[in-house]
Every structure is written in structure tokens, then in C-alpha cells.
Image (cartoon, grey):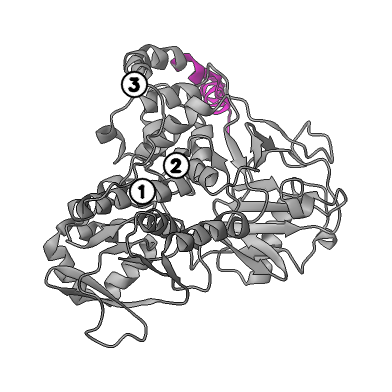
Amino acid sequence: MIVLGGGLAGLVCAKVLAERKVAVEVWEASARFGGKAGSTLHNGRWVDHGFHIFPAWYQNTNALLDELGIVDVWRSKDFDEVDAEDVPGKRRGDSRGKPIKYRKLSRTMVATLDMISRPPWYLDDLSVDGFLRARLYAGRSSGERLREISRKALGSPAYLTSSLSMQRNLHWWMPVFNEPNWNALKGSLQTTFIDPLADAARAAGAKLFLNRKLDRIEVRNGRLVPMAVGDAPGSGDEDAIVVSALPVEVVKDIARRNPVALGQLVELNSKLKDIQYLDASPLAALDLHLTKRLDSLPPHHFILRASRYDLTGLDITKVWKDYAADPKHPTVIQFCAGDTTAIRWLPDEAFLDRLIDEVRRFFPFERADVDREHTRAMKHIDAPLFMNEVGSNSKRVEPNGPNGSGVTDLYIIGDHTDTPVDLACMEGAVYSALLAAQAICKGLGIDGPAPKELQGVPAGQRRFLKVARYPLGWAALPLRLTEPYYRQRVSQQQAPLQDG
């Protein structure tokens, strides 16, 4: 069996199959494993692709951490928000932020419950913004929290994000929100997670290859045959099972470079052409190293309120063991930037300065306090993340092999495939890998793995919400009158006409 791609999904699939004595090869095109769940070294310090947290609803990913013996993690249940220094009423230099609170009686909460109660067919072709605008009780700013979640958690603006993806995100989060609901690793993803996972796959018998890049594909006798750079034409194992663990943008690029093979694959299953409709977009990141210690930072994962580039972050100075061992270690913060469209094509130094200046609006430091040697801004134009855009759910391919891809030996996995997770995240990658491994084992006549079922909002509560959404909507309708723009509009209409 050949696994194309040594990211999280590919490594998990290879590991569980090798443990069941299936001969597995992993082809990774780059010089390291992990893909977008990994890290690189920058001037002697590890830099993650972007900071990652592990929510409690990640049933399969957290089980994998336990299986690998990664139990020493940093746990939290809160999310903080920080206002800019120039916000009225904020004390200068106070950057600790405050826990995010959700009012029980608000249009955002009503919209959340309303969205959870809707059937999938109603939501997939409706954006988050479209859903909010269509509510009778909605005003200009209602649902801002949901829009914020869309930009900062799902990585795309609310006018593009599928309401179905937002529903699933809320569905998995809500049952764990009031308990310790997420953790972070005490080191880089590469050293604390990906390397142990790759070692476990090797120990099970999988053969892992770096710098082995897929060059072209052929279809012979209804089977997909991959060939790497340097392989002679007509070579390749025609009997191998192929698992594509490639990101969606790489799959699309390979399809464009192999039009004959693509045409043959589409003839076998027209569903495969739908992958071309899936999209990916850069999610920029910043690892900010300072030359001094900022002790008054939020202790949890935080968002910067109304930041120009939708910045969220985590102060890892007290989280990563290498930094926490020194109580005087200068501050190190990891950021993700939900929207850098306006500055994406600036030169690298100018891009970095824009992000630094944006962070300085919220935290008390100067440009001179930045450790330029270790600070790194990453545009990720060449490594985008799959976007949960409107209509994307109907275009996804199931990871169960012939039943999903329609090709005898082809299984497609990754967070862009059709799973109950329905989000671009680590749990989506792991879940799809387990589903594919389960289907492969079934085809080989051996016992396979079974992914843990996710625990969302109970069915009984969802049925109740189907009925309750109507009185909730009417109860929220008067709240429209509290909107500043609405009051201003009414006062303007009632104001006497002026001469002139």
C-alpha cells in the first residue's frame, strides 16, 4: 500500500494499518513529516505552522495523544479577549484581557440555538452571514460572535463560510464548553507530536520516505498507479492500494498536470471532479519573540478584539517546557491571522512590521523590544488551509475507498473529505484516516480500527430546539430596538427638517 503525503492523516493511516501487518509505504515530498500540523526550525528555535489547541471534543486526536504517551499537556477551559490600548475605559498597559462571556439572552445565542436546530440540507448552500441576515430577529451587528468564530476559528469570513460547517463546529463545542475543554502541547508540534507519531508508524513496520515527491499518475486497468520523481515511465506497482493524504490544493495541482489520467478517473467516478470545486486559502501566522518579559498577558488562548488582521494568540512562554524552565525567559507569543488579504503581497519585512504594529496596539512593547533573529511571520501562500466555504460539503469525497472515490484501489483522506467532523482541523484529518483504514481492512478481510464517535448536542435537545426556535426568535425580536444604528435611524427620521 502507498500513502501519498506524510502529514497527520497519512501518518495515522500508515500507523494503524502497519499495526495490522499491512505493508505500507509513505511518500512525503518535503524534508519533514507533519505537513500543516508540523514545525520548522528557524534560527535554532521551533516554529509551528500555526498555534494549535486540542479541544476536548477531539475524541480521536486526543485518544491518539494518549496512545503515544503524550499526557503531559497544558490544560485550560477559558478563552480571553483583549481590547486595544486606545479603547475607552481600558487601563493603559493592562493586557491581561478578560474571559469571553456569552449572555444567555442575546441574539447571538438565539442564532446559535437556531442554527443548531436546522437540517443539513437547509444550511449547506447558505453562508453564515446569509443565515444571520435572514433571521427576523437579526440586526446589523447581531451574531458578531458567530462571525468572529468564522474568521478566527474556521479561517474564512462569514460571507463565505458554510452554515453547515458552523453548525457542526457549534454542535461539537457546546457540550464541553463549560468544562476543561482544550489543551496545548508543551513544545513544538514537530517534537512533541509528529515525530513520536512517525516513530510509532516505523516501529509498527511502515516504511517512511522523505523527499519522495509524486510526479505523475496513470490509470491502468481501472486502477490508479502513482509514480515519483525519477521513476521510469510505465513503472509503478499496479496492484498497490493507494491512499491520497494530499492537501486539496496539491490534489488540484496534480489533476491539472495529469489531464489524461484525470479524465479516466472521472469516467470511473464523476464525483472526483467535485474536488476541483474545493478551495484553500492562506492562514498566516506569527511567532513573536521579545527581548523582555511581559507578565500581564492573558493566561489562556486569546483573541484581539477588532484587530485588523483577525489575530488570535497563545502566550507559550509559560506553556512550552524549554521556555517555562526559565522564569525570566523573554515573552514568546504564537499568533494566527485570520485575514491578511490586504497585506499578503507586501515584501516579507513590511508584512512582518504590519503584524508587529498591530500586536503593539494591544500589548505594551516597542519595535525595539522585538527579537528579530527569532521572530518569524509566515504568509503560507504556498501552504493554504482547506476552507469550509458555502456548498463545499456536497463536493467532498468520502474516505471509504471505492464507495467514495469510485476507483478500485484509491482512498482519499484529509480534513477536506466527507466525515462527521466537517471542519478543517486535526480531528478531521485523524477521523478520515481511521475511516479509510477501516475500509481497507474490511476489504482485506482483517479487523480494522473504528473511529470514536463524536459527542455533540444530544438528539433530544436538538428536537426541542426545532420547536423552541420560533418562540426564541420572537422573544429576541425586541432586542433589535437596542441597536445603536437603529436608534440613530429612528431619531433621524423624527428630527425636524432644516432649511437649506
Mark 1 secondary-structure assignment: helix
Three-letter code, disc 3: Ala
The picture places residue 359, in percent across and down from the top left corner, at 72, 51
How many C-alpha atoms fall within 10 Å of the one at disc 1: few (<14), some, or many (≥20)? many
Mark 3 secondary-structure assignment: helix
Instruction: Identify the residue at horizontal 52%, vertical 21% (top origin).
Output: 490
Secondary structure that dominates the magenta span: helix
Q: CA distance from mark 1 to mark 3?
A: 25 Å
Let me know if residue 56 is in the magenta part. no
**First-in-chain label (1 vs 3):** 1
How many C-alpha atoms fall within 10 Å of the one at disc 3: few (<14), some, or many (≥20)? few
Q: Relative to 173, say whether 269 is above or below.
A: below
Instruction: Identify the residue at horizontal 30%, vertical 57% (top origin).
Output: 412
Which of discs 1 and 3 lies nearer the camera? The answer is: 1
Name the foreground residue: 401 vs 391: 401
Residue at the spot of label 2: 60
Residue at the spot of label 1: 434
Q: Where does the magenta region start and end?
A: 477-500
Residue at the spot of label 3: 459
